[in-house]
């Protein structure tokens, strides 16, 4: 999930989300059953140990789900930032084109009036630049969120 981009992102997210929901519901149901079994008998037995094990599994599953949610949020933030930068780059290119055309028109007007105007060498446009290669860095706060998530799950494991 964090190291390699999946081949089919939609199928990957469907499989991962459904397996996480299944894991959470199974752990929750088994924890609920273990606790009810201990409460019905009124005395501790092996189900107490199972209850603690299922509680640890549930906490671990919640931590994994939290990391998955943070990764999905990061992808969303990075896509939004890339779109914003693409739009800003397009506006910047349009402004540059307008300035160049205004400069050409001004030079032509001055030539028509008989003035001697030196043509400035126009820089080549970078139209061949790929918009998909916009570097947006990363989500700076993700590390903080992951730290707090790990801190919370760690403190729940060993109270």
Image (tube, rainbow, N blue to C red):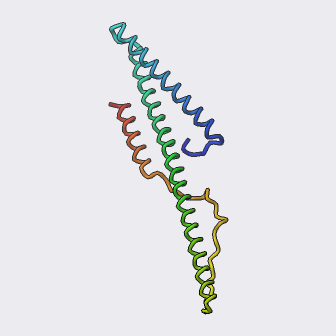
Q: Which residue is at 46% across, 51% downward?
A: 139
- Relative horizontal placement of residue 43, taking residue 20 as reference (left or right): left
Compared to residue 67, the image places residue 110 above or below, namely: below
Compared to residue 54, the image places residue 116 above or below, namely: below
Q: Nearer the viewer, residue 34 or 62?
A: 62
Compared to residue 79, the image places residue 126 above or below, namely: below
The answer to which image quadrant residue 7 occupies is: top right
- Residue 121, given in percent of the width and then of the height, sits at 63, 82
Q: Which residue is at 61% across, 56% downward?
A: 132
Q: Residue furthest top?
A: 41
Q: Nearer the viewer, residue 99 or 148?
A: 99
- Residue 106, given in percent of the width and then of the height, sits at 58, 82
Q: Quadrant of the C terminus?
A: top left
- Residue 95, given in percent of the width and then of the height, sits at 55, 69
- Callout count: 0
- Relative horizontal placement of residue 85, taking residue 33 as reference (left or right): right
Q: Residue furthest front?
A: 113
- Residue 126, given in percent of the width and then of the height, sits at 63, 68
Q: Nearer the viewer, residue 87 or 152?
A: 87
Q: Quadrant of the N terminus?
A: top right
Compared to residue 155, the image places residue 124 above or below, namely: below
The answer to which image quadrant residue 128 occupies is: bottom right
């Amino acid at each position: 999930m964090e190291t390699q981009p999946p081949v089919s992102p939609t199928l990957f997210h469907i499989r991962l989300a459904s397996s996480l929901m299944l894991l959470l519901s199974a752990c929750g149901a088994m924890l609920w059953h273990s606790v009810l079994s201990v409460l019905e008998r009124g005395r501790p037995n092996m189900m107490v140990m199972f209850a603690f094990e299922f509680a640890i599994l549930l906490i671990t599953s919640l931590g994994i789900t939290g990391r998955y949610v943070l990764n999905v949020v990061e992808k969303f933030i990075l896509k939004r930032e890339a779109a914003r930068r693409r739009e800003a780059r397009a506006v910047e290119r349009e402004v540059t084109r307008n300035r160049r055309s205004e400069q050409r028109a001004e030079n032509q007007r001055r030539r028509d009036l008989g003035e001697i105007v030196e043509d400035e060498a126009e820089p080549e446009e970078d139209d061949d630049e790929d918009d998909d290669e916009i570097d947006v860095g990363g989500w700076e706060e993700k590390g903080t969120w992951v730290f707090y998530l790990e801190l919370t799950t760690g403190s729940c494991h060993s109270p």
